[in-house]
Image: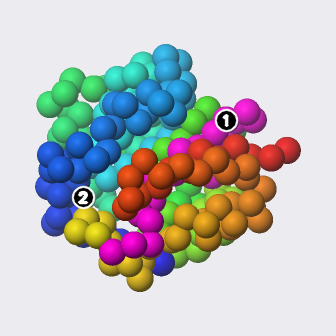
Amino acid sequence: MGHRFNPENVQKLHEPKRQKLLPAAEIIRDFGIGRGDKVADLGAGSGYFTIPIAKETGEDVYAVDIEPKMLDVLKERATADKVENIRYVVSDLEKIPLDNNTVDKMVAAFVLHEVENLSNALDEIKRILKPGGNVLVLEWEAVDSEIGPPISERIPSDGLVETLGRHGFEAKLSHPSEVHYTVVLTPVS
């Protein structure tokens, strides 16, 4: 863990093959993001999920990313799409500069495998999530594939679910494809 996506490869995030595998609008709709939800997109990158979320909620969406260059690409894309309700937050996921209980929902798409200290990141996720909120995690399954990071950098789904349980999350796992998985997290009181 700890390897970061190279901003020079940003075009890969929007290729038609990836859009077919990961239809952003459908994924956020299935997760239940709706009007009035305050949402954080962790590891927002170039806004693959951020822009559709912002269009859906009508509320502020916090685009959190450690790489300013990725947020610059997101700003350009949002401006071109006339989306103005995105708040850009340059930060890692281990100390997010948002207040406690800030958001109703979070999306963490293909970013947890890049985090240096997953325990700290999970604590932060819990801290900024409102009571009753939930989180959608998308990650690469630990299998060889043409897309995604090398297998050595992936988190196996069963390992992530186990880690989430130890950190006080109920986790609902699904496999929409052979190469990636989703987990819906709800903090256990």
Quick one: which residue is furthest to the bottom in this view? 152
Amino acid type at image mark 2? Lys
The segment highlighted magenta reads 125-144
Q: Quadrant of the C terminus?
A: top right
The residue that appears at 62% across and 70% down in the rendered structure is 159
x and y percentages locating residue 156 in the rendered image: 52, 70
Please indicate whether residue 52 sits to the left or right of residue 132 in the image. left
Q: Residues within 10 Å of mark 2 (few under 14, many from 20)?
A: some
The residue that appears at 37% across and 31% down in the rendered structure is 26
Disc number for residue 162: none
* Residue denoted by label 1: 133
- Tags 2 and 1 touching, CB below 8 Å: no
Disc 2/disc 1 C-alpha distance (Å): 30 Å
x and y percentages locating residue 64 in the rendered image: 43, 50
The residue that appears at 38% across and 78% down in the rendered structure is 151
Residue 99, visible in the rendered structure:
no
Of 159 and 12, nearer the camera is: 159
Q: Is residue 70 above or below residue 3?
A: above
Residue 137 colored magenta?
A: yes
* Residue denoted by label 2: 69
Q: Is residue 108 above or below residue 152?
A: above
Q: Residues within 10 Å of mark 1 (few under 14, many from 20)?
A: some
The local secondary structure at tag 2 comes to helix
x and y percentages locating residue 38 in the rendered image: 54, 29
> What secondary structure predominates along the stretch shown in magenta?
strand
Amino acid type at image mark 1? Gly
